Every structure is written in structure tokens, then in C-alpha cells.
Amino acid sequence: MSQQPDYESYPPLFRPSSSVNPNHGGVEKGSPEMEAAAEGDGGVPVIDFECIKKDGEKVTEACRDWGFFRLVNHGIPESLMSQMLERARELFSMAYEAKQAAFNSGAASYFWGTAAVTPSGAALAASNFHWMEGLNIPLSKVPQLHYEDPMLESFRSLVEEYGKHQARVGKAIYKALWRKVELGTLKLSKYDEPSTRYFSEDTGVLRVHRYPRCLEANRAWGVDVHTDSSLLTILHQDLVGGLQVYKDNQWIQVKPIPNTLIVNIGDMFQAISDDKYVSVNHKVKVNEEKERISVGYFVFPEDDVVIESSKYKPFTYAQFRAQVQHDIKSVGFKIGLHNFKR
């Protein structure tokens, strides 16, 4: 059964009365990029969090072959995960103008039409129009945020608790993967322990997305093909579906399964691992009948830490981010690691 949306909550260009072309510079219907993805999960690796802490072999294999895996037994309370999705759905159902007013600072910002945002949360216009809206929430600033509105304050409290769990999970995954890099032929770190400068908890960001219904869903993408600029990304999604990953020359649908997380390698981990781990291409398809909600945790290196690799010229994350923003403004899309190839 399809949902009956409150179109007043949608950005104006997403409303049925708008004359916007859902494609708006994206992929034309019937082109190869719009071909149906393979049904099912396509063998997406499933990793038990408890096993990561004991032996990182399986997660290493998943990140090398897929750059991507499903995480189970992660220890985040199921009730907290459900509340995050429910509260996010309530927030996005606010009137469009009310969302703009409520989230208008660097501590929590509202954006739509693009998945590319600056560190302050300002949207960057890309060549392809994305059928989505989002909240950008730097987790280090959440303790200083306070709202008089009970619903907003409840959401802030949930985000603070959820962010701590995400940092715990992300750090454990990072340590397991880093150990395998250091034990291999690469010697990338000057530190005895996994460098906290590469996994900087203070950089953690939650991006909460809603993908509104689209009456011409076969002509639009919630988010077009991309890799993440992060070190790691950890995604929690509702049961609507739409996430697709590229593997072995085909697109594979990632089936939503309750109380699981999707983890993918970002560009920064690909670089520091000398391409041992893969920053996977992925995208999100919109739905004709249902809205989709997702909550993504992104963590990065410190701005000034130098990424050293035999595959890439030395660069800092701040330089990488600036180059990505320049590319989006000048050519309309992210070029990414290719800019730094030796």
C-alpha cells in the first residue's frame, strides 16, 4: 500500500504541481545507467561484530573484495535504532519552511536536491539533481545543541546516544582493518597503535536522509553513482529499500534487513591502504509509492593529517575535501582520488 505524503513537507520542486523534470541533468530513462539491478542481496558479505574484535580476517576479505558488508550483532539497541528512524520521519514531515528555520546552523543544517555539503552543512549544487533531503549533524556539536521544541530536543538526545554507539562500532572496524594493513607488506603508520588521526572521532557526522516519493521514479535517483569521501561509512536504513552497490560489472540491490547496519569503505581508507580496500560505487533509487529514511555515520581523518601511499601523491584530508568541492562547482561532479594518483 502506498503512503499518502504531506506534500507541504516536501521541498517545492518535489511537489506534483512543480514543473521540474525529475531527471534534471541526471540519467535518461532507458539508458544503461537505469538498467534494473540484480535481485536479491547478490552475496553481500555478512559480518558478526563480535568476530571482528577476535579475528579481522572476514572483514578484511569483505573490504578487499566488496568494500562493503552487512554488520550484525553490533550491540546498538534495536529500540534506539527504531526511534532514530521514527523521529527522523516525524522531523521530515514538518513543513518545508519549518525545517529550514529549525536547522539553519553549522551545528545542524537542512539541505535538499544534492548529497554534497560543505563542513558547515551548506549544500553544493551538482550537475545531477538528487531526489532527497537531509540533515547534516556534526556529532561533536550535539552536546551544545538545545531546543525548546520537545520533538527537536528528543531527537537531539537520540542523536547524541546513537552517535556514541556509531563511534564505538566504527573504531572497532577501523582497528581490525588497520591491523591487517600493518601486518601486510605495507608500512603506512608511524604509530604503534592504529592512528587516531586517521580515525578522528571528532569528525563524526550523522547525515539523515529522506527520499520522497517520486511519481516518475524510473527517471530519477535519490543519490546518483558515487563513492564516499569518508574513512568509513555506517548506514542504518528503513525497510523501503533502494540502495544499490556495484560489483562484478553489475548493480546489486542491498536488501533492507531489520537491526543490521551497512558498512562501506570510503576514499580515505582506500588511499591509506594503497588500494587494498575498495571505496565502493553505490547509489540510491527512489520509490514511486513510499518514502525512504536512512541514517548514515561518516568519519574522517583529521584535516591536517597527511595521507601517504605508494598509489597517491601525499595529501591531507582538507586538501582532498577542497578539491572535491572545487570539482563539484567547476565540472558538476566529484572526481575524487583520481586527482591525486601518482
Image: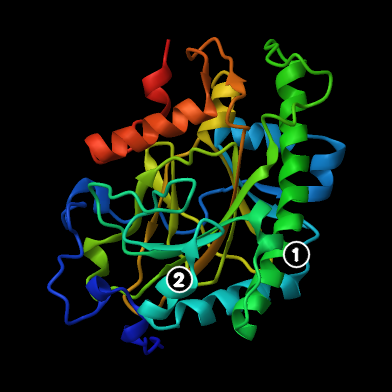
**Label 2 CA crowd tier, 10 Å (few <14, some 14–19, many 20+):** many
Vertical order, 192 against 310 (above or below): below
Residue shown at the point (34%, 55%) measured from the top left? 114
Of helix, strand and loop, which one carries label 2? strand
Residue shown at the point (49%, 68%) measured from the top left? 103
- The C terminus - image quarter: top left
- The N terminus - image quarter: bottom left
Q: Which residue is mark 1?
A: 161
The spot of residue 134 in percent (x, y) is 45, 64
The spot of residue 284 in percent (x, y) is 40, 57
Camera-side mark, 2 or 1: 1
**Label 1 CA crowd tier, 10 Å (few <14, some 14–19, many 20+):** few
Is 277 displayed left or right of 321 in the figure?
A: right
Of the pair 179 and 272, the residue shown nearer to us: 272
The spot of residue 38 in percent (x, y) is 40, 53
Going from N to C along the chain, the mark reached first, 2 or 1, is 1
